[in-house]
Image (cartoon, rainbow, N blue to C red):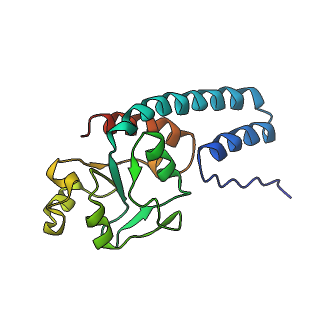
Amino acid sequence: GYPVLALRPAGFKEIIDSIRLLGAATNRREAAATLARRLEETIDRVGKKGSVLKKRGLKVFIALGWDPCWTAGPGSYLDEAVRLAGVENIAHDLGAAWGMMNLETVLARNPDVILTDVDPAHIYADTVWKNVSAIRKKQVYRLIGNEFYRPGPRLIEAVEELARILEGCS
């Protein structure tokens, strides 16, 4: 007999819409609206920085796990996050929001940056990757914390941290 509200946002717009819906459902519309506006401002701010960074043409590979290695494709919130920050996701044509990408394809696309949830030392030690630009430039970054892996308000806030990381990449 308890009312239930199930939310499953897939991207930034859905996260913000879910906040407003939850605010309405809990009679906290004003607090929800304040949070939603703050998150929208964050998205705008990162998007402006991202439009400048986009001109550099950086390519990123999002490596989730290592053996097997999954990645984020179009329609995923991580794909949206890196695109907002101004870089190209090399899995842009994966055909699904989440999936595995052929190793040869990843190597051929030669990402400039690797974002991962595993220890970067593990990736640097794997000789298969030695000629990849991200390895040569020492641009493998571990994204630690639930904020990068759960589509909620903290993900949007974490995008600013991601943008700072990417601004320092070449």
Left or right of 107 on screen, residue 52? right
Q: Quadrant of residue 129?
A: bottom left
* Residue 132 locus on image (x, y percent): 20, 59
Q: Is residue 108 above or below residue 147?
A: below
Residue sitting at 18 percent across and 56 percent down? 121
Pick the residue in front: 146 or 135: 135
Question: If the image is split into quadrants, where does the N terminus sit?
Answer: bottom right
Question: If the image is split into quadrants, where does the C terminus sit?
Answer: top left
Residue sitting at 30 percent across and 67 percent down? 66
Left or right of 162 on screen, residue 155? right
Count of marks, rendered view: 0
Residue sitting at 43 percent across and 35 percent down? 50
Pick the residue in front: 23 or 122: 122
Residue sitting at 69 percent across and 53 percent down? 7
Judged from this view, the residue extending furthest toward the right is 1
Q: Quadrant of residue 89?
A: bottom left
Left or right of 30 on screen, residue 90? left
* Residue 148 locus on image (x, y percent): 45, 48
* Residue 27 locus on image (x, y percent): 80, 34
Left or right of 5 on screen, residue 116? left
* Residue 136 locus on image (x, y percent): 14, 52
Q: Is residue 110 above or below residue 145?
A: below
